[in-house]
Image (cartoon, grey):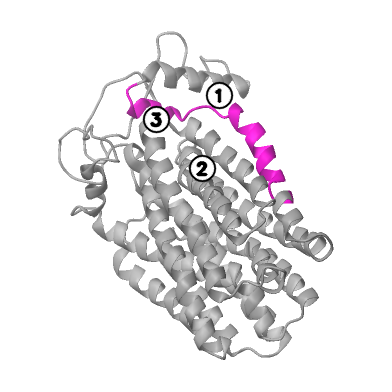
Amino acid sequence: MSFVFPELQHGPWKLNEYELGSLATIIGCGSMFGTTIWGGLADAYGRRNVFMITVIFVVIFGIASSFATSFYWLAGLRFWVSFGYGGNIAVDFTLYSEFLPTYGRGNMLFLLTGFWPLGQIFASLLAWAVIPSYGWQVFVAACTIPTMITACARPFIPESPRWLLVQGRHEEATQVCREIAECNGKSFAEVGLDEGCEVYLDNETVGLETGTQAPHQGGCLSPWGVGRFFGPALWRTTLGCLILVAALSYSGYGILTLMPRFLEMKGVSQPNMYRSMVLNSTAELPGVFLATWLATSVGRVLPLQASMFLTGLSLFGFSFASSRVHIAACTMFASCFLESAWALYHVYVPEVYPTDCRAFAVGLLSSMGSVVSIAGPLATAWLMSARDSVFSVIMVFASVAMLAGVSSVFLIHVEPKDRDLVDFTSKQGKTCNKSMD
């Protein structure tokens, strides 16, 4: 949508700042509802079904939005695109993390985050090639092609054995693990799953909260389910993650969605703007590599805090930049550190919350970020309308990012590096036959 906004402003529709801000707000609303609802459903009814349904939402409404004939039709259809996309965010990292062993889990999760900048590069190149010649509608339709391919592949992905075990469905979990072994050319005996053996969770006695009570059966969507995230043991982590995701969402709105318009306001011509966006997207790849190296050698927490602060510092430099070289350097650094922070955040949250509420935790936190996505565009529209200079607007984005980095130092304290995934919020034990790990 970052490439569509300038077309909507300068094209036949002639949308003003507030209309563009309203469009971004509606998209944020869809994401907010999607992450919360789909995340809760994934914890209650399984990862796999939600995993497949959400991508179908994105494909159907993504194609439909390319045929929108008015602002209202576009806003309504993009709401449902973001509703499905919110489910992607809540479920994808959750499902993937639950298939991975403790050793090497970080590297594999960061490998997944590397596909985000690849998608950014693809979108930038596609916009450069399509929009000037064919218009934004063709571009929006073409952006659904990778999602269509994904929709065809997802039915082959099995349900999470870890989620099945949390639900007490040991036979189904064992069968999934046997199928995985068979796909990898292993016999059941080689992986300890011959006849008479079942998988079980060997780390379920390691809880985030103290106590011996069994997990509450009301589900994550119950009042208790939401309230436990703000209990004595979890409130610091939850509050810290809320501040981080809010700042990441707001900073991302400036660095990704508004960047073409910022570049235009700084006097960068349209061909150079597309070139700059391709470079910015390419700069995200080093951000993922940097996050991977630091997270596996130092840990998740300190690099996450530093990346957030450095994102703000890069935007601070961008607000003062005037030459094309300095503008390009600052925007590339901002994209690099923003992607590094997002990668670390996406890996951190599924690792720090337990299986019985992991998808809902990811969805709940993401929905809080979407709240910022609702208010942020309107506040930014007011700033851009009230101020003659882009300087003050960019400084707001820079300040938010740096303040989030500083505040997270006092709140984010649980280091999940080399730690087993936790399965239940409270301590309890069961006796089964074969360990998942």
Which percent across, then down, holds residue 175?
48, 17
Which residues are drawn in magenta?
A: 142-168
Q: Specify the amino acid type for callout 2.
A: Asp
Disc 2 secondary structure class: helix
What residue did someone put label 3 on? 45
Disc 1 secondary structure class: helix
Crowding at dot 3, Cα within 10 Å, few <14 / some 14-19 / many 20+, comes out as: few
Disc number lying in front (3 or 2): 3
Disc number lying in front (3 or 1): 3
Which percent across, then down, holds residue 27?
51, 57
User: Is 407 contained in the magenta span?
Assistant: no
Q: Specify the amino acid type for callout 3.
A: Tyr
Q: Quadrant of residue 424?
A: top left
* 400 is higher (above) or lower (below) than 129: below
What residue did someone put label 2 on? 92
Name the dominant secondary structure of the magenta segment. helix
Which percent across, then down, holds residue 35?
43, 48
* 278 is higher (above) or lower (below) than 192: below
User: Is 143 contained in the magenta span?
Assistant: yes
Q: Earlier in the sequence, mark 1 or mark 2?
A: 2
Instruction: Quote the CA–CA distance across marks 3 and 1.
Output: 21 Å
Numbered tag placed on residue 180 in the rendering: 1
Quadrant that contains the C terminus: top left
Instruction: Quote the CA–CA distance across marks 1 and 2.
Output: 19 Å
